[in-house]
Image (cartoon, helix red, strand yellow):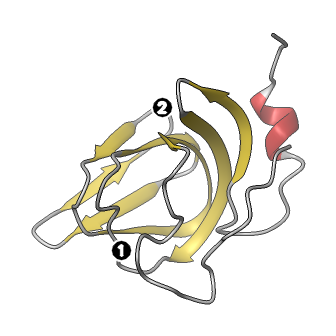
Amino acid sequence: MERINLQEKFAMIHEQWSPRVIAELNGQFVKLAKIEGEFVWHAHAEEDELFLVVRGQLVIEFRDRTVQLGEGDLCVVPRGVEHRPIAEQEVEVLLFEPVTTKHTGDVVDSRTVTETIWI
């Protein structure tokens, strides 16, 4: 039980598309990431994924629509739904997802993260 300051944690992140874990509860990770550009199309077969925009503007593309998120907005991507996050400028996001969630689902890409890093 400790205080976690999001601004302090974001200041520790220097890589794009490389989520860092800041907390764990009930089998879920709370992660922070800085993202810019287009990510890969992917889905998580067994897990839902929550994106909360802390700073900036994020677009999440789905095969049938696009969701635009601003600061304070969130979107839950249901399990099995293919999606692609896009950020024209750097965005700071909080992610909430099960510990078992693979960064890029079953897609292996140069940005796929396999190591869990706590900050």
Q: Position of residue 21 (x, y in %)?
A: 72, 44
Secondary structure under tag 2 reads loop
The image quarter in which residue 16 lies: bottom right
Left or right: residue 84 versus residue 52 is: left
Secondary structure under tag 1 reads loop
- Name the residue at the left extreme: 64
Compared with 117, 1 (above or below) is: above
Q: Position of residue 119 (x, y in %)?
A: 86, 43
Label 1: few (<14), some (14–19) or many (≥20) C-alpha neighbours in 10 Å = some
The residue lying at 81 percent from left, 10 percent from top is 1
Label 2: few (<14), some (14–19) or many (≥20) C-alpha neighbours in 10 Å = few
The residue lying at 70 percent from left, 65 percent from top is 18
The image quarter in which residue 112 lies: bottom right
Residue nearer the viewer, 97 or 60:
97
Q: Which mark is residue 22?
A: none
Compared with 64, 71 (above or below) is: above
Q: Position of residue 10 (x, y in %)?
A: 79, 45
Q: Position of residue 22 (x, y in %)?
A: 75, 36
The residue lying at 62 percent from left, 89 percent from top is 110
Mark 2–mark 1 CB contact (< 8 Å):
no
Q: Amino acid at mark 1?
A: His
Task: Write down the residue under mark 1.
Answer: 42
Q: Which mark is residue 72?
A: 2
Residue nearer the viewer, 44 or 51:
44
For the residues marked 2 and 1, what is the alpha-carbon distance in whole angstroms? 24 Å
Compared with 88, 71 (above or below) is: above
Q: Amino acid at mark 2?
A: Gly
Compared with 89, 54 (above or below) is: above
The residue lying at 51 percent from left, 51 percent from top is 100
